Image: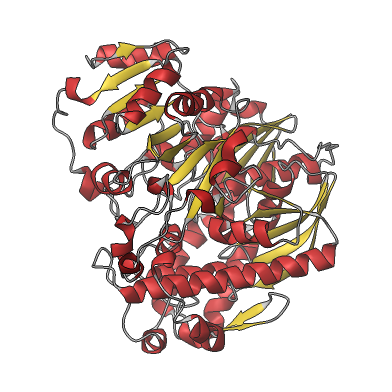
Amino acid sequence: MNILGISAFYHDSAACLVQDGRIVSAAQEERFTRKKHDFSFPTNAIQYCLQESGLKVEDLDFVAFYDKPFLKFERILMTYLAYAPVGIRSFIKAMPLWIKQKIWMKEFIKKELDFAGKIIFPEHHESHAASAFFPSPFQEAAVLTLDGVGEWATTSYGIGKDNKIDILAEIHFPHSLGLLYSAFTYYTGFKVNSGEYKVMGLAPYGEPKYKGIILSELMDLKEDGSFKLNMKYFNYCAGLTMTNKRFDKLFGGPPRKPESLLTQREMDLARSVQEVTEEVMMRVTRHVYKETGQKNLCMAGGVALNCVGNGKIVREGPFENIWIQPSAGDAGGALGAAMFVWYQYLENKRTADNKKDFQRGSYLGPEYEDKSISDYLRKNKIPFTEISNEDIPEKIADLIAEQKVIGWFQGRMEFGPRALGSRSIIGDARSPKMQEVMNLKTKFRESFRPFAPSVIKERVSDFFEFDKESPYMLLVAPVKKEIRREMSEEEVKLFGIDKLNVVRSSIPAVTHIDYSARIQTVDKDVNPLFYRTIAAFDKKYGCPVIINTSFNVRGEPIVCTPEDAYLCFMRTNMDYLILGNFLIEKKEQKPLDKDIDWLKKYELD
């Protein structure tokens, strides 16, 4: 049986194909259109999913869309009515697309796909919950979803057991932890639904000076983690911005202009909202544990990408085991909707062993065989050296040790926002200068942002205060005390971004300024070539940790095809690119002919 899941028309459109209950393929539309967070109907992603399995539309048994358009429209309409006449500009802007297209989703999908079969519409948070529980390794677990907003729900929890999820409670719009975080993302000058992870990365540079104001003025937080926001400070219900003038007055000025200089104020705001978010996540988690009596927890929704909060839940409990959907945002709703149909709607049996998940490493996107890569290289007269699979690990390990920055393009593209060793840029984690070099010369992004480490699974506790698996780079943990370097009195006094250049451990390029790191543990059975490369670096140079950052530049979606990878490689100061079995050295390449002004095209988010 073939089930196609779709998410679209908000942000991060995606498609996923589930065959007889197995997740076969999944991809975000942005990877094909090269528009970050592309929200349009995922025509290219659907085409890829069908081609991957040699299917045509008539082979599909069900299509599942990740939310209920009529219920969402009701929420939008009711909200505007509640605030009318305020919000008329926003109303006029939003309505045409809704009336012409979004509300008639069933007819739209039928027409776009030329599909005559049944279309199922799970609720938004049901799709998130399904994406969290059904691919998880657990037969039974508590399920928690946290995001901006779906139809009405912004937070929900329940119990997943066998092939069914029962939602027990919800918090409804406009009271939303995701939208609170997005309000501060907007206010600190980053793009909403895109730059939230930057706020998280900026937080360690600040002090939680505004935490008290947020908890006393902006939200009424209860002991069980439920909360209400004080809507007099927010504009997102009826306006075109997230916050209003009362918010500006409360925090001492207007929002920061995008790309203007970051000040200590933004860092303090980031730290404050991050601490509040962690506080809410911890309270909700404790409540869900108490109410469900489960020892396992599954999470999804955009807030579940807050890996600092996730790491705290892992460290401080009370759950014994946690699994988080790697594509926790709306893209993952496509996967959740398809899994919802297979298990909950069709009532197919589900058996999990409580050890191995069903996400397949999240390597669910397109793969390019060596022949198609060599055809591309030869056709474009790109000089390269062919290397056997056996020789790749040692060769790349040597280049990392020589302080080279390497584009790594291997196997199936990842589904989700993290590069997990298929579309990655890698480098030496031991280098004190590599973070700055890669941020400013290779990624062209803000210098404050940390890089993540990939570490072979068996060695994770040698370098981090962490002894579990983190295959999807969704957990932050402290760097091990034994490898830290104590700061001098003068270094302790440094302020804000000046702290960045202080060496803090034997792996400084992946040690954030608060001695934390966002970890990916690499399993030899899940990504053998990536594992063998890190293991080769360890064997020869004594370090099983490397830098792993996504293969893209600022504001650009992660690369999908060999051509995307080569263009990104040539536009940056990467030294080498390994495309399948073909190694490309920058100094042997001719400059790009008639390239576009890509820095303008890919704006900072």
Q: Is residue 465 above or below residue 169?
A: above
Residue 348 is left or right of residue 144, and the answer is: right
Say if residue 536 shows up in the picture.
yes
Inspect this view and state whether residue 121 appears: no
The quarter of the picture where the N terminus appears is: top right
Give whichever of 182, 341 is nearer the camera: 182
Image location (x, y in percent) of residue 118:
71, 41
**Quadrant of the rendering where the C terminus is positioned:** bottom left
Q: Classify residue 410 as left or right of residue 255.
A: right
Residue 48 image point, x, y percent: 51, 29
397, above or below 449, in the image:
above
Give whichever of 583, 365 is nearer the camera.
583
Identity of the residue drawn at 42% across and 50% down = 505
Residue 507 in the figure: left or right of residue 165: left
Give 369 or 99, whichever is nearer the viewer.
369
Q: On the image, which quarter does residue 462 sit in?
A: top right
Is residue 23 positioned above or below 151 on the image?
above
User: Quarter-wise, where is residue 501 in the image?
Assistant: bottom left
